[in-house]
Image (cartoon, coloured by chain):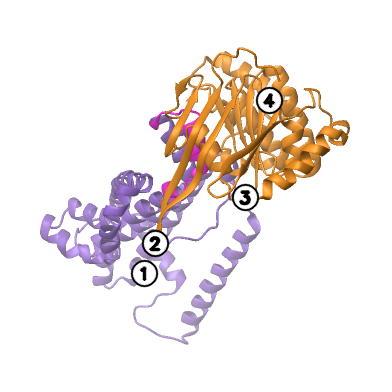
Amino acid sequence: MSVAQAPSPVFALRDLGYSVSIREGVREILAGVSFELAEREILSIVGASGTGKTSLLRIVAGLVAQSSGELSFRGVPVSGPPLGVAVVFQDYANALLQWRTVAGNVLLGIERRFSRAECNDRVASALSLVGLERHARDYPWQLSGGMQQRVQIARALALAPSVLLMDEPFASLDALTKSSLQDEMLRLRDETGASFVFITHDIEEAIYLGDRVAVLRGRPGTIAECHPVGLGRERDQVGTRAAPEFLRLRQHLHGAIGAHA
Amino acid sequence: MNARPLLSGLGGIGLFLGLWQLIIGSGLIEYDFLPSPWAILGGLWAMLGDREFYEEALHTLAATLGGWVIAVVLGVGLGALLGSSTTCRRYSLASVEVLRPLPAVAFVPLALLLFGFSLQMELLVIVAPALWPSLINTMEGFAGVPQRLSDVAASFRLSPIERLLRIDLPAAAPSVLVGLRLSLSLALVMSVVAEMVGNPQGLGYGLVREQQALNPERMFGYVLVIGLVGVCLNAILVMASGWILPGQFRRPQAGWDTP
């Protein structure tokens, strides 16, 4: 990783906390979370359930405000979803508009912003990036789970975002679909130059995709450690997963992720 | 629509009418004023020659649709408001739950006092009960829009209007349309009630008039016509829903939810 003299980071979180009021008082979900996301970087955040992964992503996405601490996007404090940031949710069935076709879903974020021709171009290229060009007129419920998740990714890509925030996007998919979408994501990073925050509970996935892996741990959750992944940018499903660095990190994270949980 | 259940259904009706005809014809049961289906058909045929009958049918249709439109505009508007705002819901749900179970017919004396024997009276009797199915179903439709879709709307930075038109309304549409159908059948029932006891016009009045004139064939004729109007109105609305709702909702929904 060489982020020499980077201007301001894409996202910067400092000492961020989040709590919700419940019947018995206040529950702390996150406390003292700090990290930065660099340009063109994939930051994996891995954590067990109940450590506040989804809350963290919703805060970074501007969908809910933090209770304390600072969050800035390209140097500007975040108050609401920033322009150029797209989110991909885990539950694609809820996140897609079931009454719109695939193309209609991809149009959602752009239809009021650009001319009709520009929209058509963007939909076509977003769909071809995820290999769904032949399904533009299908409805989401006619597609498999993996294809529906591709629709959600295409919908995000149509915005030409500079950052994609992904919340366990491949968690409910079968192993084969999962690995092919992982490779697609790496390719997309190279083609679009976007940065990613990739949230997952899957340690291997976190290492395979990440330039860095941060561990979210404890209750309230906090970033307990953060490791650069010394595997270079080229990854492949067989070789990378057998590399000594991969195995070393995996073993370390297995211990790290569960402690104090 | 699948032809087979329709045919079987018609078969059932045919069987019932045949039995009825047989029992009356054989003299097994004798009431002075229970005509056979065949005699009712004769009465209906005679009615179809009357100008008055068409005016009555037109009146009932107009009152039903007019009352329904008012009920739907109020019901969907208020339902959308209550469904999308937890605060609104918190403050008004108690009133809704108190007003809603009032028997629809209980509005008749009030409406008569307020408006006398008039169309306004009829409309009040229709709107007051027909409002609720639209309101409740719209409210539940809007309140049931998944949190995830709200996240999607926010992260795509949709304006409140865009959000209403692109996300909330289509997501709530199946539920809203069920409400519209329930309201419509209730509107027809209430217009007939209003005409029977209050406003001396329309099919309901015709029904009572023929009963008092001891014309059971024509009276049953009116019952039949009112029933047919109800079936047709519902069928039109079901077809329209299938046309309005694209995608998954184009599949037919579970059928007989009319009261």
Q: Is residue A138 above or below residue B219?
A: above
Residue with the mark numbered 2? B44
Place of residue A164 in the rendered image (x, y in percent of width and height, measured from the top left): 61, 27
Cα separation, mark 3 vs mark 2, equals 71 Å
Q: Using the image, determine if residue A13 lies above or below residue B235.
A: above
Residue A215 spot, x, y in % from top left: 65, 40
Residue nearest the viewer, comparing B19 with A93? A93
Q: Quadrant of residue B165?
A: top left
- What chain does mark 1 sit on? B
Q: Name the residue under label 1.
A: B217
Whether labels 3 and 2 share one chain: no
Relative to residue A229, is residue B190 drawn left or right?
left
Q: Which circle, 3 or 2, is nearer the viewer?
A: 3
Q: Name the residue under label 3.
A: A49
SS for callout 3: loop
Identify by letter the chain in orange. A
Identify which amino acid the numbered label 4 is placed on: Leu
Badge 4: residue crowd in 10 Å (few <14, some 14–19, many ≥20): many
Q: Do labels 1 and 3 share a chain?
A: no
Amino acid type indicated by mark 3: Ser
Q: Which of marks 3 and 4 is nearer the N terminus?
A: 3
Q: Tell me whether circle 1 and circle 2 mark residues in contact (CB < 8 Å).
A: yes
Q: Which residue is drawn at 60% across and 25% down?
A: A37
User: Are the residues under marks 2 and 4 on the same chain?
Assistant: no
